[in-house]
């Protein structure tokens, strides 16, 4: 059985979020990507505490496609240090997970 992941990133506009999502799905690096409404992020950057609105993008993919998906996010992202966090999917519906594999398989 394949290993499945959700991969999270954030960006500062809905347009950038959609571009990241669409690029990953078009390249079959993710079966789908969901964009959440803005969240408020509070973080330390270059010695200062920052607060900003960000859009979260949650990709559904396989472990086999993770490295390429991470590379896509890093290349397409305009942040110096983009958030890229992968979380294993412990369980899921068999039909849905089969769809994830189909949609992330090239050829």
Image (tube, grey):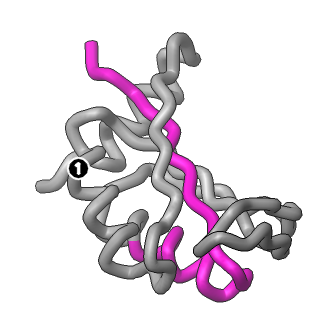
User: In percent of the image, x 81 and y 60: which residue is there?
Assistant: 42
Rendered view: 54 above or below 33: below
The verdict on residue 4 being magenta is yes
Q: Which residues lie in the magenta part?
A: 1-23
Q: Quadrant of the N terminus?
A: top left
Residue drawn at x 56%, y 50% as measured from the top left? 8
Lateral position of residue 98 relative to residue 19, left or right: left
Location of residue 2 (image quadrant)? top left
Q: Nearer the viewer, residue 17 or 23?
A: 17
Callout 1: helix, strand or loop?
helix
Q: Position of residue 93 (x, y in %)?
A: 57, 17
Q: Considering depth in this image, is 39 or 90 the residue closer to the camera?
A: 39
Residue hosting label 1: 67
Quarter of the rendering occupied by the C terminus: bottom left
At label 1, counting other C-alpha atoms closer than 10 Å, the crowd grade (few under 14, some 14-19, many 20 or more) is: few
The residue sitting at the left extreme is 107
Q: Nearer the viewer, residue 31 or 36?
A: 36
Identify which residue, 102 or 88, lies in the foreground: 88
* 102 in relation to 30, above or below: above
> Which residue shows up at 46% across the image and 24% down it?
88
Residue 41 position in % (x across, y down): 80, 62
Where residue 32 appears, x then y in whole percent? Answer: 52, 54
Q: Which residue, as the protein is rendered here, is positioned at the far front?
A: 47
57 relative position to 7: left or right: right
Q: Is residue 107 left or right of residue 17?
A: left
Does 70 lie within the magenta span? Answer: no
Q: Residue at x 44, y 50 (%)?
A: 31
């Amino acid at each position: 059985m394949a290993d499945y992941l959700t991969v999270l990133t954030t960006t500062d506009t809905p347009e950038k979020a959609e571009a990241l999502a669409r690029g990953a799905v078009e390249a079959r690096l993710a079966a789908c990507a969901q964009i959440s409404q803005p969240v408020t992020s509070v973080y330390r950057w270059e010695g200062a505490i920052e607060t900003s609105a960000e859009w979260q993008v949650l990709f559904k993919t396989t472990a086999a496609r993770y490295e390429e998906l991470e590379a896509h996010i890093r290349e397409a992202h305009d942040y110096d240090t983009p958030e890229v966090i992968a979380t294993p999917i412990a369980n899921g519906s068999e039909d849905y997970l089969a769809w994830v594999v189909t949609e992330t398989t090239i050829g």
